[in-house]
Image (tube, grey):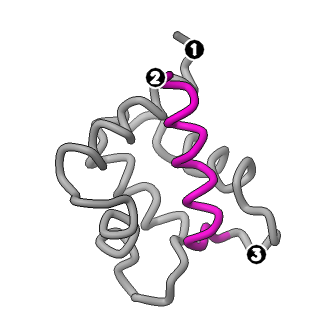
Amino acid sequence: MTAEESILNKIQILITNHFETPKKAFNFFDEDHDQKLTKSEIVKLLKEAEISGFIRGVVSSKLIEGYDKNADELIDWEEFKLAISKIKKSDS
């Protein structure tokens, strides 16, 4: 399992074990309720997913870089769904 797959797996476990749906997970971490996840909100998600503190900042930047399709440096619900779909594909 690659590092990316390991991180995505931990995120999937967090979402599956603590939230009824991915949308509820997204809303929980969207602290300012603007329907977008900021880097700091993503870092909190990664902390809850038990991603090492040492790499959270790097991973959050890479997640934004990889899934931020409209280049606003935020992850909106549609972009989050794309990330979730990749998690589900890597789990199959």
Magenta stretch secondary structure, dominant: helix
Query: N-terminal of the two: label 3 or label 2?
Result: 2
Residue type, label 2: Ser
Task: Decide: is 3 above or below 18.
Answer: above
Q: Residue 14 falls in which quadrant of the image?
A: top left
Query: N-terminal of the two: label 3 or label 1?
Result: 1
Residue at 55% across, 71% down = 77
Position of 22 with respect to 66 (left or right) is left
Residue type, label 3: Asp
Q: Secondary structure at mark 1?
A: loop
Query: In the image, which disc is placed on residue 2?
Result: 1
Residue type, label 1: Thr
Query: In the image, which disc is placed on residue 72?
Result: 3
Name the residue carrying label 2. Answer: 6
Residue at 57% across, 31% down = 89
Residue 50 is situated, as x and y percent measured from the top left of the image, at 28, 36
Residue 66 is situated, as x and y percent measured from the top left of the image, at 73, 47
Q: Which residues are magenta?
A: 74-92
